[in-house]
Image (cartoon, helix red, strand yellow):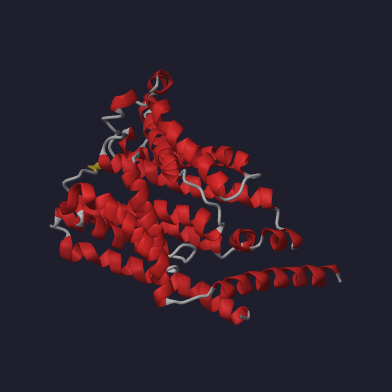
Amino acid sequence: MGHGGNLMKIKKDLGVLLAVYGLLALLPIFFHNNMSLMNILIISLIWAVVAGSWDLIMGFAGIFTFGQIAFLVIGGYSSVIFCKLFGISPWFGFLIGGIVAGGAGILVGLPCLKLKGAYVALVTFAVHMILEPFLKSDIGRAIGTGGAQGILTVPPLKIGSYVYNAMEPTPWFYTLLIISFIAFFIIYKVVHSMWGYSFIALRDSELFAQSVGVNAFKYKLIVFGISAALTGMIGGVYANYVGMLSTRILGLDLFLILMVMLVLGGMGRFPGALLGAFITMFISESLRYFDTYRLIIFGLLVMVLVIKMPQGIIGLIFPLGKAGIIERTILHFREKKAKKAEMIT
């Protein structure tokens, strides 16, 4: 695959992203009076950002981390607590939630740098498990988490004199559409940058990546920070939309649903997580009639998808073998080394 093929891949990814968001932007014109459907669309946009951020670190960087929901909760609680303590606008609270979660991501990433595979998954899942008792503890209550009860009142989101409310979902939808598009555009730019190629190189062959000058320590911390920051930011938005926060979000059901989104969309296939989020949410809503069997069905769905559709929905539309990914990555670093040699001479 030459430089032209690589450029076509970049343009194709952006084209798919713009096409999906263009279609989504039209939906409220036809369904703005359908409160149930609008709520599903809004929640889908929120979970799409979480899934896309998780895909950045797990699908593209190949780091199997299970702490993504923890960063969502950290960002959500941080955003609301700062807004309440200092009376700042939730718009700034979202940014603070992203910064705090990003910092937490880097701290969690540090002990994971010398670990691989299942050990990284265990460490990050331990953070997930520890977070709930911490938020419910005396220390948690002291910093404003509300303990076991959670945070029951969240400062409302405003634009000028207009106050967002659940009875008018269209403003929420377009706000989430813009925020989620910014998040996915950031992911797109990262994936198709020096950082993204470094992530893929480390995923496919860490020895090869280091041989061409990729600093594993640096880039692993970068991907932990970016992934956690985007997740924490959307955590603040989630808290504001729902109007409350509790540790129930740390349950297994959301974790499993997000995993389905990744597998269904296509891990490491931009913007598969976006498509996977919407398809999964509509499947989830249709399975609510099965009550307690819902998670069992989801678990079976993950197994079938991994076996039958290893590249997800995006893989069906745009097939790409692993050899193609590795070839593109090697080509990028070869071009980079050639440019350095030309500058020296």
Residue at (37% x, 65% y) in the render: 305
Residue 128 left/right relative to 202 = left
Quarter of the rendering occupied by the N terminus: bottom right
Query: In this picture, is 292 found above or below 275?
Result: above
Between 130 and 13, the one lying in front of the other is: 130
**Percent position of residue 292, x then y:** 21, 46
Residue 246 left/right relative to 104 = left
Query: In this picture, is 296 found above or below 8?
Result: above
Number of numbered discs: 0
**Percent position of residue 120, x then y:** 56, 45
Residue 196 left/right relative to 335 = left
Residue at (62% x, 40% y) in the render: 110
Q: Could you tell me if residue 143 is visible in this image?
A: yes
Q: Quadrant of residue 51?
A: bottom left
Quarter of the rendering occupied by the C terminus: bottom right
Q: Residue furthest right?
A: 345
Query: In this picture, is 236 found above or below 4?
Result: above
**Percent position of residue 157, x then y:** 29, 41
Q: Could you tell me if residue 102 is visible in this image?
A: no
Between 22 and 206, the one lying in front of the other is: 206
